[in-house]
Amino acid sequence: MIRNCRGQTKEWGGRLPVALVFPEEESLALSTLGWQRVYKDLGHNNLFYVERFFWDRKSGKAKCPDSDKTLADFPLICFSLNFEGDFLTLINILKAENIPITASERSDWPLIMAGGPIAFLNPFPVIPSLDFLFVGESEGRFVAISEVIGNAWLKGNSVSQVIASISGLPGIMIYGQQQKVKKQIFLTAEGYLDSPCHSTFVSRASVFRDSFLMEINRGCPYGCRFCAAGFIYRPPRKSKTQDLKNLVQKVNPRKVGLVGTALTDWEDLFSFLTWLHKRKVKFSLSSLRADGLDRKFLEFLRRSGTRSITLAVEGISSRLRRAMNKHFSSEKFFKAVELISEMQFNTLKLYFILGLPGESDKDFHDLTHFLEMLEQARKKGMGRKKKGVDLISISASMFVPKPWTPLQWSPMDKEEVFLEKVRRIKKMCAQYKGLRFQAEKPFSSRIQGLLSKGDEKVHDLLVLASENDNNWRKALKMWSGNIEDYIGSELSVEKDFVWDTIDLGVDRRYLIREFDKYKKEMLTSPCPDEPCPSCRRCGMDKFLSDSSFPERRPAALTSGKKDFPDGN
Ligand code: SF4
């Protein structure tokens, strides 16, 4: 008997052994919910023996924290892809196990697949390494697909027989088979998430130390034009508050981490936090909007032990924030800063994005004014006290054009242009005491941009990087492709992308209209409260009404003979 899951033991024999690999370090894996749900769902199914694997920086291998098994022991290896950087780690992990890194070199087990958000954002750079992908969210369907594979494996089917049996199933993408694949999602008839995703493991090693994470909502109604989360998780859905309470009562955690976007928009936020506080459950919040931070709420946060507030400002000027559809009120933002200073929070973290399309000198002048106002708000909040907020920390990331966003056609700045912008802001921030500035490395951001928009040709670059100790600069020089072809200039909206073979539901014409509105600096209102069929703005209404799409019929997930043959 081997310890397999918290409170659960299983035998290896008579089941399909599945390795669930998170190609990042354990701390990040334990802070990510999608793969934990898959782990739990497969672990509770008697057809599978499941082990989790995390990338180990020291050895460069994927290691299982629960047993001494190695990846090569498993006939089914599932990678959870959450970041573009996972592509290279995936290849390195396969190499470290002496598993051939391209699917065409493998003729026998293991079967290697991937899922996760990158599988429906743009998985094409890594596709040659995979036997298949699951394009969809973590609920339901992936287990049904795995059942097909499990039954086939137990019957002694070959890999090619298994591939043939899953080909054409909903959400399955097989390299070389170019049919359009519809992303699999699930929502209840009332438009809620099926049940809240939550931590399967609570650990000190997590980025959110000792926290039981719960998903409050998925997707974002605002549709900021640079942000993939606002487009790839449509329609925005939330968990039922009663489901969240039931979960807390069942698990009885010491600390809860609320995961979601724009949490201050959630109408039950304050009452839910008050309910947690009364039960002596600590909490942390992943994302707040300045316009939701009034005196009453901030006082409550301070009283209940919150020391740090994080706000995303994004664009460096009000013009750019408007163009990106940020719905940002400067007045409310500086009022919130004043209150944060008055209540002496330890840290205020602010996030900016550099290099948005059309960014110019006048936007930097606007930022100068913004920093002055920030200082004034901090001082006003302090009043006569000696101390306000201890530290204001400003972080800048570089704009990366993401697939499925209205800015997917936009270019990225050259490295030296980014570096000059970083120097410029650093100098501006240095004038203020208690203001710290840090920025991502522009070169890494440009690699992220290339991987985000890459096609199968980028796989050669990944292999070169892997062969050269992950040295991207060296690999780029050796590669036959050119990074500028992907991120060097604005592309025509007529251009087809490789990810167009995935159907996420958002109409391309809607993205083009939003791109045009970026250039005209026009706002689009957030998703309304009513469901997609009443709104019909972005195309999700058609996607959800497709009669071949059983997202509202969970029974079909495991019993639909037509959708899921038994693998013979
Ligand atoms: S159809 Fe309307 S409500 Fe539905 S995702 Fe699109 S914009 Fe939002």
Image (cartoon, grey):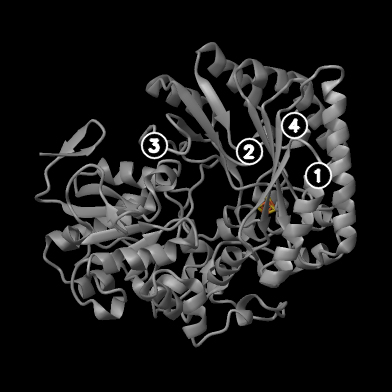
* Mark earlier in primary sequence (1, 4): 4
Q: Is residue 196 left or right of residue 403?
A: left
Q: Residue at x 49, y 88 (%)?
A: 480
Quarter the N terminus occupies: top left
- Mark 1 near mark 4, Cβ–Cβ under 8 Å? no
- Tell me the residue that label 3 is attached to: 205
Quarter the C terminus occupies: bottom left
Towards the viewer: 154 or 342: 342
- Location of residue 518 (image quadrant): bottom right
Mark whose residue sits in front, 2 or 3:
3
| In the rendered image, the vertical position of residue 259 relative to residue 298, given as above or below | below
Towards the viewer: 193 or 465: 465
Q: Is residue 470 left or right of residue 488?
A: left
| Amino acid residing under circle 4 | Gly
* Mark earlier in primary sequence (1, 2): 2
Q: Which disc number belongs to residue 287?
A: 2
For marks 3 and 1, give the CA distance: 35 Å
Q: Which disc number belongs to residue 328?
A: 1
* Mark earlier in primary sequence (3, 4): 3
Residue 46 rendering spot, x and y as whole percentages? 19, 44
| Amino acid residing under circle 2 | Ser
Mark whose residue sits in front, 3 or 4:
3
**Mark 2 Cα-neighbour bin, 10 Å: few <14, some 14–19, many ≥20:** some
Q: What secondary structure is marked by label 4?
A: helix
